Image (tube, rainbow, N blue to C red):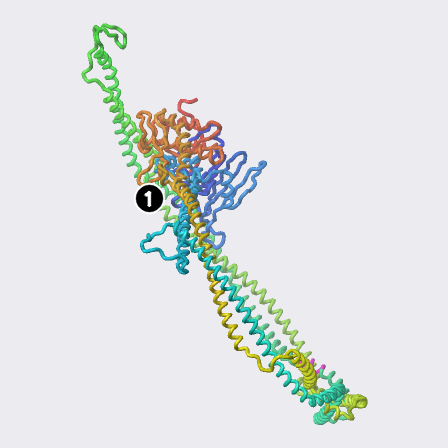
Amino acid sequence: MRLHQLELTGFGPFRERQLVDFEAFERDGIFLITGRTGAGKSSILDGVCFALYGSVPRYEGGDKRLRSDHCAPEDPTEVRLEFTVGDRRWRVTRAPEYQRPARRGGGLTSEPTRAELEELVDGSWVGRAGKPRDVGLLLDEVLGLNAQQFQQVILLAQNRFSRFLLASGGERQSLLRALFGTRRYEEYVRELGERSKAGQRELEALGERARTLLDQAERLVGAHDLIPEPAADDAPVVELTARRAAVDLAEQRAAYRLDTLARERADADTVRAAAEAAHAERVALAKAQGELGRARARLVALEEAGAAIVHDRVRLAQARAAEGLRAPIEALRRAERAAVAAAERAAAADAAWDRVRPEALADEDPAVLVERLTGELAVATAAAAQESALAEAQTQLRAAEARADQLARDLEALDAQRAAVPAELARLAAELDAEREAAARRDPARAHHAELTGRLAAAEEAEKLARAQRDAEVAHRDAATVAAAAAARVAELLQRRLDGYAGELAATLVDGEPCAVCGATSHPSPAEPGDEPVTDDVLAAAETARDAAAARERIASESARAARERHGAAAARAGGQSAEALRDLLAAAAVDLTAADRAVAQRDALTRQHTELLALDAEAAASRDALDEALTAARTRSASLTATVAATRAVVDEARGDHADVAERVVHVTALREGARAVAEAREDAQRAEARVAEARDDARERLAASVFADAEEASAALLDPPSTERLADDIAAHESQLAATRARLLELELELAGAPDEPADTAGSQAALTAADEARTAALRAERDAQTLTVTLRELAVQIDDAYAGLAARAADAAAIARLADTVAGRAPNTMKMDLETFVLAAELEEIVTAANVRLGDMSSGRYRLQHTDARAARGAASGLGLEIMDAFTGQARPAQSLSGGETFLASLALALGLAEVVTARAGGVRLDTLFVDEGFGSLDDETLELAMRTLDELRQGGRTVGVISHVAAMKEQLPAQLAVEATAEGPSLIRQESVVPAGGA
C-alpha cells in the first residue's frame, strides 16, 4: 500500500485546505514531520486514518473533535486521500458530522457523515461507493487490514507501539486476538466444553435408564409371583448378573403360564359356541311361532277393511275425471267476479267525474280531454319553474346593486390612502442614506476589535511567558555550569589516570622478567606511583555524573529553547505592544464597534420599514385593480339580472291566466286531467272484463259437454284437493300391498312350522346356559391377555436392559476421550502448561514476531539485547504463554521489559512494532507496505542510539518504501532534509509546508 496525496480541509487544527504530497518524498525515502507541540503534526496521521477507516486512534475513548475549532459555521470539513493497493489507484473522501447554517429558516442544522470511494480507470475517476457503510465494506476488501492492524503495522501512533512490549499477558492476548482473528479458537474450546458436559449428561442418563428398567422388571416380577421371595439369610444386595438372570427366569415362567391359559381359553371357546347354537335354535322357533299368530290376525283385519277400499276406488275415479274441468270452471268464476268489480269501478269513476267536471266539458270525450290537458299542463309547469326562479333573481339583483355601490365606496377610500405614500417613502429614503454610511464602518471596526482582542491575549500571555523564559534560562545556565564542571572533572581524572599508568606498571616489574611494554629484563629506574591513583570505579562514577549532568543540561536547554519560542511567538502575535497600550486601544475599538452596531441596527430597521411600505403600496395597487375589476363585474351582472327579471315576469303573467299564480293553475289542470283519465280507464276495464266472461263461459260449456258430469255443480262436488287425492291413492295401494304380503308370509310360516309342537318354545334355560359359558370365556380371555402382556413386557424390558448397559459401556469411553480433549484445549489437567488453545496459537504467532523483531533489535542495541518469548505460567490465574522478556548479553540473564531505560524501551518497542508489522502483513495475504509512519519517541535516545535507530529506519526505505517520522529532536532535523513542517499561524489555524533542509556543512 502506497500513499500519494492527502487533503485536509477544516480538519483538526487546519481550517483552510492543506495538501500533503507523499510522492514528493519517494526519492528521499524518509521524511520528517516537524513543528511545535500542538501545531498538528499527529493530525496528519489522524487524517490518513479517518479517510481509510472513519475513526481516529487518539479519540477512540473520548469526544471525536474532528472538525476544526477554527472553522466558521459555513466552512466545510473534509478529508481526501489518494493511495494505491497493488496496481489499482483509489481516492477516498470523508466528512464527519458537524453543524452548519440551515439554508432555510435560520439557525444550525446537522451536516450528516458522508463518504465516497473512487478508482482511477484509464485516467478518469470512477465512483465505486457513495455511502459510509458501502465505502467501509469495499475498503475492508481493498486494504486487507482492519483499523487496529493498520495502526500496528503502518500508522505507529504516538505512545502506542510501546504498549505491546510492556503489556501484561492478558492485554497482549487481547491485542493479538484482534490482529490475528483467533477468537474462533475460543469458540472451539467452548464448543468442546459443551460437548464434554453433554456427554457426561448423556452417560448419566443412560445409567439411570438402565437402573430404572431393571427396577421396573423386578417390580413386575414381584407383582405376578413369578420368582419366590429370597430367604431371610440371603444378602440384601443382589449382583447385577443375578438380577438379570432372575428376569430371564421370570420370563420363562410367564411364557409357561401363558401356554396353560391359552389352552383353558380354547376350551371355554368350545363350550360357549355349543351354548350359543342351542340358544339360537330355541330363539328362532319362538320367533316363528309368534310371527305366525300375528300374520293370521293381520290377514283377518285386512279382509274386513275391503268394503271401504272399494268405495275409495270409486271416489278416486270421479275426482280424477273432474280434475280436467277444474281450470275452465275456476276461470269462469274469476272472470265473472272481475266483471262485477270493473262495472262498480266504472260507475264510481263516472260519479266522481260528474262532481269535478265543468259544464263546458260535459260533451267532450274524457280520453280526448286527457290529451289536450296534458299539453296545457306541460306549458304551465315550465312557467311555474320560471315563477319560482323569479323571486331568487330579484333577490340577486338587489344584492348585485348593493355590492356595486359598496365597491365604488371602497375604491374611493383606497385612492385617498395611497395619496400619502410617496411623501413617506421619500422621508425613509433620506434617513436610510444617512445610516448606511455609518453602518459601513461595522465590519472594519469588528475586524479591528477582534485583532486587538487577540493581540491583547497574546501580550498578556507574553508577560507570563517572559517570567517562565527567565526561569528556564537560569536553569539552563546552572545546568550548563554543572555539566561543564562534570566534564572537566572527567578530563582531569583521565589525565591523572594517564599520568599514573607508568607508576602502576612499575609496581608490577620484577627483575629478570621482561617488561610488558619494552621487553627488557632489567629495570634500573622504575617510575614512582602517584599519591592518589585513579581507579576504574572512580572514573566510572565521574563519567556517570558527567552523563547525568549532560542529560540534565540537554533537558534544560530544550526547555529554555521551547520557552524562548513560546515567548517569541506570543510577542509576535501581540505586535510588539504592551498589554496596557492594547487595553486602551481595545476600549476605543469597542466604542467604535458599539456605534457601528447601533447604526447597522437602525439601518436594518429603516430598510425593513421602507421595504414594508413599498410592499403595502404594491398590495394597495393590486387591491385597487381588483376592486375596479370587481366593480365592473358587479355592474355588468346587475344589468344582466334586470333583463332576466323582466323577461321572466312576462312569461309568468301569460301562463297564470285567471289564477292567482301559475302553481295554482298547474294544480287545477292536473286535477281535471286525472279525473278524466280515471273515467276513461274505468270504462275500458269494464268492457274488457265483459269480453273475458263471455270467452270463459263458452269454454266451460264445451268441456262439460264432453265429460261424464251433467253440469258444473256436479263436477265441482267431485273435485278433491291434490293432497287428499294422493292420500286416497296411497291408502288403496297400501291395502292391496299389505294383503298380498300377509297371505304370502302366512303360507311360508305354516310350511316352516309343519310338524313343530304347538306349545311355545322355552328360551330362558338356553339363555342362562349361554350367559354362564360367556362369562367363563371372558375370564379365560382376560387371564390369557394379561399373561401375554406380562410375557411381552418382560421380554422387551430384558432387551432394553441389555441395550442400555451395552450403550453405557460404549458411551463411557467416548465421553472420557471428549472430556480429556476439552480439558486439554481449555488449559486444565492433563495440560501441564495451563495454556488454552487460543493462547497456544497466539504464542506461536508471538514467537514469529519476536524472531522478526530480534533481527532489528540486535542491530540497534549492538548485539546486547534480544527479545525472548516465555511460556512460563503466570501467577494468580493470569494469562500464561504470552510473556516477553529481555535477554541481556552483557549479563547472560533474562530480565523484564519494564527494567529497560526510556531509550532502550523505545528501541525494543520499535523493533517489536516492525516485527509485528511484518508478521501481520504476511497473515493479511502479503499486503505490500510502501508507506510507514512512526510518531514520536526519539527524544529519549542518546546520540549513538539515535544513530542506530535512524540506521534501522533508513533500512526500511529499501524496495521503494517511504517512511514518515514525527519528532522534535534537532539532530533528526539535520539528518533528514526532506521535511513536512506544520506551523501554527498567529490567528490560530495551522499550515503545512513541504520543504528540504540542507544539513549543516553541506553544499
Q: How many marks?
A: 1
Q: Quadrant of residue 538?
A: top left
Q: Position of residue 377 (x, y in %)?
A: 71, 83
Residue at x 78% of width, y 93% of height: 710
Q: Position of residue 769 (x, y in %)?
A: 51, 73
Report whether 951 appears left or right of 563.
right
Residue at x 46% of width, y 56% of height: 606
Label 1 CA crowd tier, 10 Å (few <14, some 14–19, many 20+): some
In the rendered image, the vertical position of residue 108 relative to residue 862, given as above or below: below
| Front-lying residue, 768 or 456 | 768
Q: Position of residue 866 (x, y in %)?
A: 36, 28
Q: Secondary structure at mark 1?
A: helix
Which stretch did the figure color magenta? 378-385
Q: Position of residue 139 (x, y in %)?
A: 50, 41
Quadrant into which the C terminus falls: top left
Residue 130 visible in the picture: yes
